[in-house]
Image (cartoon, rainbow, N blue to C red):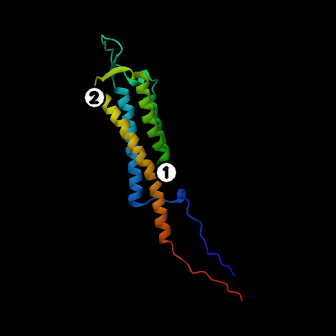
């Protein structure tokens, strides 16, 4: 007679609660994403730069202006969406994937806005805020990638740890002759 081993249903990743260092690491990374997104919003509101056309022999630098004024507020919209998604993501798996993806998309949008408005221009920042805004955008994207990796790896490791610690109960076998 053929016997089948008793199989138990695997835990769903949504049902696993992170504890200890895993929970602290996830929440800490989420709060860093929130802080960087808020910093992005403030820096892009304050950032100023000016440009000159590189096609002319006589360079005329224009007045200082912001990237927001040139791109219909797109550099601020991305971090605001990350803030909203991060507030929603505090509750559990897989919610932190959304702000992580939005943080990466924000980098693409900001680079696209900068290239679309100043691809053939020479630009210079009129304050250190331009450099800080760029660095904050890069930091938000890198931290978003880190958060995405954590959001996937931490619950899988917690599930493996729980399954390893599950007791194994003896089963009765029916033998027929």
Q: Quadrant of the N terminus?
A: bottom right
Q: Could you tell me residue 20's position as x and y percent?
A: 39, 60
Q: Secondary structure at mark 2?
A: helix
- Neighbor class of circle 2 (other Cα within 10 Å; few <14, some 14-19, many 20+) is few
Q: Quadrant of the C terminus?
A: bottom right
Q: Secondary structure at mark 1?
A: helix
Furthest toward the right, the residue is 177
Residue depicted at x 50% and y 68%:
163
Q: Could you tell me residue 131's position as x and y percent?
A: 31, 31
Q: Which residue is mark 1?
A: 91
Residue depicted at x 57% and y 81%:
170
Counting residues from the start of the chain, the first of labels 1 and 2 encountered is: 1
Which marked residue is nearer to the observer: mark 1 or mark 2?
A: 2
Horizontal side of residue 143 vs 3, given as left or right? left
Q: Is residue 39 above or below residue 153?
A: above
Q: Could you tell me residue 49's position as x and y percent?
A: 33, 22
Q: Which residue is mark 2?
A: 128
């Amino acid at each position: 007679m053929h016997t089948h081993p008793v199989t138990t249903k695997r835990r769903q990743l949504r049902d696993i609660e992170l504890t200890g260092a895993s929970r602290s690491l996830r929440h800490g990374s989420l709060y860093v994403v929130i802080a960087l997104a808020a910093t992005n919003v403030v820096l892009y509101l304050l950032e100023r730069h000016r440009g000159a056309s590189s096609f002319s022999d006589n360079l005329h630098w224009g007045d200082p202006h912001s990237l927001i004024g040139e791109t219909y507020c797109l550099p601020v919209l991305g971090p605001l969406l990350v803030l909203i998604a991060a507030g929603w993501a505090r509750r559990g798996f897989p919610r932190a994937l959304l702000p992580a993806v939005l943080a990466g998309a924000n980098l693409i949008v900001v680079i696209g806005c900068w290239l679309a408005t100043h691809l053939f221009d020479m630009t210079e920042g009129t304050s250190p805020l331009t450099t800080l805004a760029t660095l904050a955008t890069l930091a938000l994207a890198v931290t978003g990638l880190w958060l995405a990796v954590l959001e996937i790896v931490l619950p899988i490791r917690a599930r493996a740890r729980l399954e390893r610690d599950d007791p194994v109960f003896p089963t009765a076998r029916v033998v027929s002759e």
